[in-house]
Amino acid sequence: MTSMQVESCISCIPLPVVCDACTASPSETELEFLVHQVNQLPTDALEEMIYIVSAYEPQWLDVLERSVDSNFDVTTLSPLAIEVMQHYVYTNLACCFVANMDNNHTSNDDDMDVGA
């Protein structure tokens, strides 16, 4: 393969697209909501989230050492780290919602069996 062929192959490879979520910061209201949701996480989920975020922001391991119940200053995080945190929190909320729906469905089935 000649260098000209290599260059033409390379030019066919799509370049990564920079999304708005990676470059734009969330609003103050969104950050406040995120912090509120983070503070609602169980301790083990909170620790796991901090470890994941610390892959993007190593200084966040200090947050874990200080206190898991502190009010997090998410404004110091990069937009990408905030997006990672949002994904973790919203996934956790969705899992809790599904688990509660499943528990409600199971208990309703049990109630129906008792009356039969």
Image (cartoon, grey):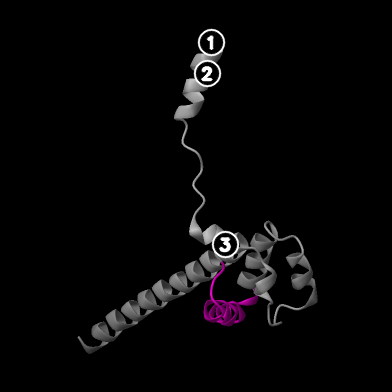
The percent position of residue 56, horizontal first and vertical second, equals: 67, 57
The secondary structure making up most of the magenta span is helix
Position of 45 relative to 108 (above/below): above
Q: Quadrant of residue 64?
A: bottom right
* Residue in the image at 33% along x and 77% along y: 106
* Amino acid type for the residue under numbered disc 1: Thr
Name the residue carrying label 3.
Answer: 84
Q: Which residue is mark 1?
A: 2
Q: Position of residue 81 (x, y in %)?
A: 62, 62
Which residue in the rendered view is the most extreme toward the bottom?
A: 115
> Which secondary structure lies at badge 3?
helix
Amino acid type shown at disc 2: Val
Magenta segment: 25-43
Alpha carbon of mark 3 to alpha carbon of mark 1: how far?
Answer: 42 Å
Nearer the observer, disc 2 or disc 3?
2
The answer to which of 114 and 58 lies nearer the viewer is: 58
Circle 1 — which element? loop
